[in-house]
Image: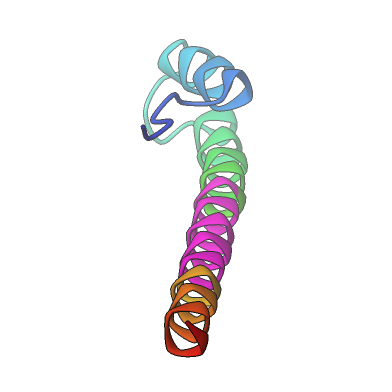
Amino acid sequence: MHDYTIPQDIIKIQKKLTTFEKDSRNYKKYTKILAKHIKSYTMKKRVNAHIKTIETIEKIEQEGIEDILK
C-alpha cells in the first residue's frame, strides 16, 4: 500500500551523525544536511500524495459522468 521506507541517503547521514560529538562543528554541519534531505523527501511525499488525490478525483468525476450518460 504505502511506501514508508526511509531513503538510504538519510540513513547514511544519520549513521554518520551518530559518530560525532554533540554540539561539535561537524555535528551541526551534518544536522543541517540531514534536515535538508528530510525536507526534500517530505516534499516529494506530499507532492505524490497530491497527485494521487487529483487522479482519484478525476477518476471519480469520469465515472460519475459515465453513469449520467447511461
Which residue, as the protein is rendered here, is positioned at the far front?
Answer: 70
Front-most of residues 28 and 9: 9
- Residue range in magenta is 41-56
On the image, which quarter does residue 30 sit in? top right
In the image, what residue occupies the spot 44% across and 24% down?
5
Does residue 36 lie above or below 66 as drawn? above
Percent x, y for residue 12? 57, 15
Image colouring: rainbow
- The number of numbered badges drawn on the structure is 0
In the image, what residue occupies the spot 52% across and 40% down?
28
Percent x, y for residue 43? 56, 59
Does residue 44 lie above or below 37 as drawn? below
Front-most of residues 28 and 55: 55
Front-most of residues 11 and 27: 11
Front-most of residues 52 and 11: 52
Q: Name the chief secondary structure element in magenta.
A: helix
Percent x, y for residue 14? 47, 22
In the image, what residue occupies the spot 54% across and 54% down?
39
Percent x, y for residue 38? 52, 44
Q: Quadrant of the N terminus?
A: top left
Magenta highlight on residue 43:
yes
Magenta highlight on residue 45:
yes
In the image, what residue occupies the spot 52% across and 88% down?
69
